[in-house]
Image: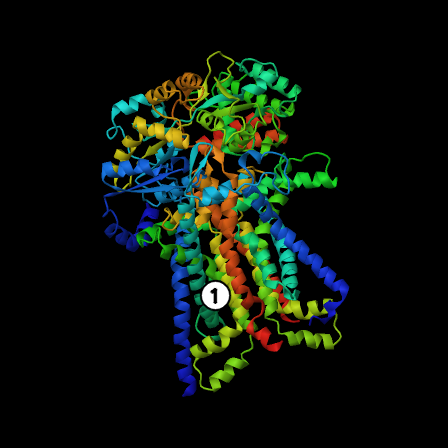
């Protein structure tokens, strides 16, 4: 399938496209990195692609215990930052695990199992994608208080699942629909149960869809702001997205610190993507035919 | 009433659970403050030891803290045992009965020492005790003025324009006057302040707009801003600048005047690690067309929500926060201007207040924006003000149209 | 015999799989939604002691409010720009990722990166790039000779709307790319072989094999682009505050409900926003399915 592309022209085109994609995606991130190593007094000057006086002071503020800057003790924000980072990871990972598990089995039921109200159920769930967070926030807050789930991982994960399940469910349903039923029928004829077939035959084939759902859910949860703002009052569960705006103190926006924190915050999700990528781009089915 | 019934039924089960649940841990105190209320740990340790409670200190960004407080209060719970209470929220939170009166809980001697407490009264009840005493002064770059051969800070708006023109002519700063013109709250407050500079008030005592006539102070203030922008004394980019952005420009030496300067910022501007103009910055009384240097106070307080689980400890916390030694720590570590006059004097006497004499002189002249107390419709009005001024600054509408639009917004906001 | 036990088995398994979904969605989404919908028929304002039933009065007022109308216009502009740019860019990126042989995982990680930057940091980075005096955009365009002097980008409504959309697209495009990539990966390679044996070139291959088979993925990607663009808040708020030129419907909801405390009015607007994004999504979901079903 790669043969027609092996012409020089095709390769050049691909190289160009790769270059364009990299510039578009990495350019602003690079600029964020440059800001994170620019000393505060240099920020208002002629912008340059490489900072003239690179400094690690913002990272020092992030990681150092306390550092001395011109006679002033500057407090490290690392304890807060690391707690928030951990919270982001735990809530996003928890939401991803639950969402993917529920979507993988639920979508299977919506495609392969027959039960009353199947389609209407599915469409109703998918339609909730369109609900803005503000619409449900106040009643949801009352509910979470009464369930005593405010400021708990369980509460945040449950809300994330309810928010991101529709997308994952829809994606998995389309994946199952595209799959031929013949393999499953063969397994049933061999006497395998439904559940066994799902776990050992269907899910491996659906790997690209599962991984795509996982990546989407993780990234969506990672970037959430409104939900944790209201439901995570303290550092017990507060994620990075809510912590970072606090670096805007009243009399001064700590651009350098904010960008340093931002640069550091992209590491965990990127690691996850690198780790999962293998399964996304070479799903077992594609691998079998190559 | 019907709605209440519906809600009552719908909420019956969860509510029953709720009633059975919390209010058990009375030895815990939760406090919700913005980033400049991130109290140093040494300080809170003292309070914890003295009051014998566990302190659960929460901070949220400024734009977000209101969302949090409104959501929990509407849901019938307390956002925390003690929370931020901004001057601009008073009308709304007072009318909603979300905060408890403090006059019986706090020592009257403390209240008497804090001139801005009047801003936190609703129907005569004190709902918050000031901890950050933000008021406006004229902050300027003395070295740049001297370079343009101007020895003294301007005392009137005309002198200010003249000085700015001189600075621009001498090519010391491209755009000497720093003023936000974006569609953000800082733009509105700057116009309110300038209205006082031009010797007037926005509303009469029945909240009727008084800024539509060309000879009114509000009209002059807006036309001052737009003219200065057109003449190149204000950066054309100001239509996208918030108050904090303007302050960054001042710190970088790009503007000569921080016209709507926050008094607390003197400490920041004078800090060489954070500012390039640390040796050049100076404060002056607000310019005025009437002689008296009128200015605006925009203080922040701590209040106790009506549903707070531990109001007693919260009151103890407020009293403790108002202690002179703690106000000094707040000023030194977080840049919060002390609320108590006696503490301001004490700081000035010990030489810790940059241009302290000016600040003290200006502090006594602080006025609230609304003599009658902040009305509940303030945010609707204020959002409209910044949006309309932003339009005028972009050249989309004239000053005449802008003041008429603002007046209409004020009338609409009061309509219900 | 066999068949009937199978059926009971099927129903039981369906119950086990679907009940968790019903509990989570019913409890955390539909129940609060119904409460909000009912609340939007009352006048709820914490500053006023009573909360009378007002029927559709909140909705009627929203129809005539000029700020609300402006915010609808802006939101529709964001949706149009975001959907078009994200779909073209995301599909392009996915096709590229599907073809590239070396360093594919690194390219994918780079593509996904914009999503990982916390939204606040994202908006602030772009704010710096767009800064009229010290920003990169003016510097680059000046350097290329495209503009003669520094531009204040946000003074012009069309430019402001476009730039805010661009920031949004930058952040959201990876989602479209990942969905499309998953769809592309599920196309069996032998279909391409067959088409090629029939003499189809790359363009024909794309039209006859790729497009019909990624149709459901495309529908999902289009809907999620629409929904996220309808919910645009951070980018416009950080870059331009409450400016009427760029104010989105969600910003209008925030101002109405949380700043002005007209809660039921805000709830009513948020319900209209929900209906709006549902209707727009439905239009092309149906369209995509109809156009590709019969191929």
**Front residue of this view, candidates B130 and B204:** B130
Q: Residue furthest top?
A: B291
Chain letter of disc 1? A
Q: Nearer the viewer, residue A259 or B27?
A: A259
Q: Position of residue C111 (x, y in %)?
A: 59, 56
- Relative to A123, B400 lies left or right: right
Tell me if residue C82 comes above or below residue B231 in the rendering: below
Q: Secondary structure at mark 1?
A: helix
Image quadrant where residue A246 sits: top left
Residue B276 shows in the view:
yes
Rendered image coloring scheme: rainbow
Please state, as top left, top right, bottom left or bottom right, where the N terminus of chain B lies in the image.
top left
Q: Residue furthest bottom?
A: C1
Horizontal and vertical percent for residue B132? 38, 29
* Residue at horizontal 42 percent and vertical 63 percent from the top: A98
Q: Is residue B412 visible?
A: no
Q: Is residue C136 above or below residue C25?
A: above
Q: Which residue is mark 1?
A: A122
* C11 vs A134: above or below: below
Q: Is residue B125 left or right of residue C130?
A: left
Q: Residues within 10 Å of mark 1 (few under 14, many from 20)?
A: many
For the point 56% across and 54% down, the residue is: C113
């Amino acid at each position: 399938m790669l043969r027609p592309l092996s012409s020089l022209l095709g390769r050049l085109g691909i190289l160009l496209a790769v270059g364009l994609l990299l510039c578009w995606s990495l350019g602003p991130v690079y600029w964020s990195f440059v800001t994170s190593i620019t000393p505060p007094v240099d920020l208002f000057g002629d912008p340059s692609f490489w900072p003239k006086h690179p400094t690690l002071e913002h990272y020092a503020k992030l990681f150092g215990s306390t550092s001395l800057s011109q006679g002033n003790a500057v407090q490290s924000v690392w304890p807060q930052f690391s707690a928030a980072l951990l919270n982001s990871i735990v809530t996003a990972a928890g939401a991803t695990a639950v969402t993917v598990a529920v979507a993988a089995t639920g979508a299977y039921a919506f495609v392969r199992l027959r039960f009353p109200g199947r389609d209407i159920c599915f469409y109703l769930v998918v339609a909730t994608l369109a609900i803005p967070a503000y619409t449900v926030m106040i009643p949801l807050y009352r509910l979470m208080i009464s369930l005593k789930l405010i400021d708990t991982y369980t509460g945040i994960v449950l809300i994330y699942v309810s928010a991101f399940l529709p997308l994952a469910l829809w994606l998995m349903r389309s994946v199952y629909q595209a799959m031929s039923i013949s393999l499953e029928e063969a397994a049933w004829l061999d006497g395998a149960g439904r559940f066994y077939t799902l776990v050992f035959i269907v899910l491996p084939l659906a790997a690209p869809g599962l991984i795509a759902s996982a990546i989407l859910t993780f990234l969506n949860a990672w970037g959430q702001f409104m939900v944790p703002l209201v439901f995570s009052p303290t550092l017990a569960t507060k994620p990075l997205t809510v912590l970072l705006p606090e670096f805007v103190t009243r009399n001064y926006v700590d651009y350098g610190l904010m960008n340093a924190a931002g640069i550091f915050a992209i590491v965990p999700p990127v690691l996850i993507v690198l780790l999962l990528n293998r399964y996304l781009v070479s799903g077992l089915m594609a691998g079998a035919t190559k | 009433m019907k709605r209440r019934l519906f809600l009552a039924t719908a909420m019956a089960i969860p509510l029953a659970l709720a009633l059975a649940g919390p209010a058990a841990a009375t030895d815990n105190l939760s406090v919700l403050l913005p980033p400049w209320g991130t109290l140093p740990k040494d300080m809170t340790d003292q309070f914890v030891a003295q009051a014998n409670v566990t302190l659960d200190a929460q901070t949220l960004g400024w734009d977000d803290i209101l969302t949090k407080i409104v959501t929990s209060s509407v849901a019938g719970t307390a956002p925390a045992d003690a929370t931020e209470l901004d001057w601009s929220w008073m009308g709304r939170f007072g009318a909603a009965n979300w905060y408890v009166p403090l006059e019986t809980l706090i020592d009257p001697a403390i209240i008497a020492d804090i001139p801005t407490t009047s801003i936190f009264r609703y129907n005569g009840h004190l709902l918050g005790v000031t901890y950050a005493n933000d008021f406006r002064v004229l902050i300027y770059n003395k070295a740049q003025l001297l370079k343009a051969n101007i020895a003294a800070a301007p005392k009137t708006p005309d002198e200010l324009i003249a000085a700015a023109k001189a600075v621009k002519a001498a090519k010391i700063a491209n755009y000497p006057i720093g003023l936000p013109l974006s569609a953000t709250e800082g733009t509105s407050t700057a116009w309110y302040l300038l209205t006082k500079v031009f010797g007037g008030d926005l509303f009469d005592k029945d909240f009727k707009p008084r800024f539509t006539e060309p000879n009114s102070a509000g009209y002059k203030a807006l036309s001052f801003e737009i003219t200065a922008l057109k003449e190149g004394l204000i950066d054309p980019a100001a239509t996208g600048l918030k108050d904090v952005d303007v302050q960054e420009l001042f710190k970088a030496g790009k503007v000569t005047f921080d016209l709507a300067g926050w008094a607390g910022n003197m400490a920041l501007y004078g800090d060489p690690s954070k500012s390039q103009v640390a040796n050049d910055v100076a404060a002056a009384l607000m310019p005025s067309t009437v002689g008296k240097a009128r200015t605006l106070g925009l203080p922040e307080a701590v209040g106790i929500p009506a549903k707070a689980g531990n109001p007693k400890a919260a009151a103890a916390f407020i009293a403790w926060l108002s202690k002179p030694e703690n106000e000094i720590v707040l000023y030194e570590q977080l840049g919060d201007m002390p609320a108590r006059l006696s503490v301001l004097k004490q700081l000035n006497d010990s030489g810790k207040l940059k241009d302290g004499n000016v600040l003290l002189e200006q502090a006594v002249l602080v006025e609230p924006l609304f003599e009658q107390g902040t009305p509940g419709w303030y945010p609707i009005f204020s959002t409209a003000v910044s949006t309309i001024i932003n339009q005028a600054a972009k050249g989309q509408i004239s000053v005449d149209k802008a003041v008429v639009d603002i007046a209409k917004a004020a009338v609409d906001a009061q309509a219900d | 015999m066999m068949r009937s036990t199978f059926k009971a088995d099927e129903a039981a398994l369906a119950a086990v799989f679907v009940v968790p979904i019903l509990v989570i969605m019913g409890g955390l989404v539909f129940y609060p939604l119904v409460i909000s919908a009912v609340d939007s028929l009352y006048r709820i304002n914490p500053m006023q002691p009573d909360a009378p039933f007002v029927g559709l009065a909140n909705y009627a007022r929203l129809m005539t409010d000029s700020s609300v109308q402006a915010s609808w216009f802006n939101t529709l502009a964001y949706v149009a720009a975001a959907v078009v740019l994200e779909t073209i860019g995301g599909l392009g990126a996915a096709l590229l990722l599907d073809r590239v042989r070396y360093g594919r995982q690194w390219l994918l990680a780079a593509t996904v990166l914009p999503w990982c930057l916390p939204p606040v940091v994202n908006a602030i980075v772009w704010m710096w790039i767009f800064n009229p005096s010290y920003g990169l955009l003016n510097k680059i365009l000046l350097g290329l000779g495209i503009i003669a002097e520094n531009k204040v980008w946000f003074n012009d409504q069309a430019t402001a709307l476009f730039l805010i959309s661009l920031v949004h697209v930058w952040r959201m495009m990876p989602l479209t790319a990942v969905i499309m990539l998953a769809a592309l990966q599920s196309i069996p390679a032998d279909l391409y072989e067959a088409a090629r044996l029939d003499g189809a070139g790359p363009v024909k291959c794309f039209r006859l094999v790729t497009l019909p088979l990624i149709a459901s993925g495309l529908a999902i990607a289009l809907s999620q682009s629409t929904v996220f663009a309808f919910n645009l808040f951070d980018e416009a708020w950080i870059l331009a505050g409450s400016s009427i030129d760029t104010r989105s419907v969600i910003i209008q909801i925030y101002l109405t409900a949380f700043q002005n405390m007209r809660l039921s009015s805000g709830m009513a607007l948020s319900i209209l926003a929900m209906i709006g994004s549902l209707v727009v999504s439905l239009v092309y979901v149906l369209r995509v399915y109809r156009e590709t079903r019969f191929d």
